[in-house]
Image: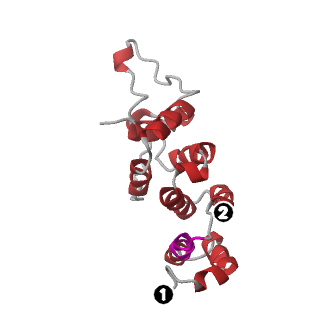
Amino acid sequence: MLIGTEAASSLFPELRALMKNPGGDEDTRELALEVLLSAAAYFPLVDLADLLDDGSLTALKLASRAVEKAGVAAIGASTVSALLRSLAGLYPKPNSRHRDSMSRYFIKTLIRSFEVADVAIFLGDLSEDLTCACSPRHAFLCNCRTARARSSANSSTAILNSLLPA
């Protein structure tokens, strides 16, 4: 009921507290963010640092939604790069037998919202310290670029693969 209304502006402190509450219900946190994002006076950059510090799946979803809605130009490429690095940690570790059912589709939605110039920046930032961890005999046998054989040092390869055009 508050989305798009002027009453939302007077409730900024309460809505921000609901959104940033790590013990809160995921749906409540998402609705609070949607109300905030619908208000013209809300600038999501002020809350992104707290969401990134939280680092939970819900907090990273909220941060992704805020970036998607506000745009990279409004948030800043360095902050979005930090978000992408945090999102890389949501992918399972290599050789893990545990298969989680966690949806990471929101990452694809976020990446689709980027402009081409932004993608080039993020590719550079995320691949800066990328090294081969599988040590194949031949370069074409390297599995580091696939999600199956990531090491903890190369956890960003899943995000890098999503940034690259198909």
Q: Residues within 10 Å of mark 2 (few under 14, many from 20)?
A: some
Q: Residue at x 63, y 60 (%)?
A: 51
The disc labelled 1 sits on which kind of residue? Met
Q: Residue at x 60, y 72 (%)?
A: 19
Can see residue 35? yes
Colour scheme employed for the rendering of this structure: secondary structure
Magenta stretch contains residue 48: no
Q: Residue furthest left?
A: 166
Q: Using the image as rendered, state which of residue 72 and residue 65 is in the foreground.
A: 72
Sequence-first disc among 1 and 2: 1
Left or right: where does residue 106 sit relative to residue 44? left
Left or right: where does residue 117 sit relative to residue 47? left
Residue 83 location, x and y as percent?
57, 49
Left or right: where does residue 149 sit relative to residue 35? left
- The magenta-colored residue range is 32-40
Q: Quadrant of residue 106?
A: bottom left
Q: Are marks 1 and 2 in contact (CB under 8 Å)?
A: no
Q: Which quarter of the rendered picture does the C terminus lie within? A: top left
Residue 15 location, x and y as percent?
63, 78
Q: Main secondary structure of the magenta part?
A: helix
Nearer the observer: mark 1 or 2; the answer is 1
Disc on res. 118: none
Query: Where is 59 relative to 155, above or below?
Result: below
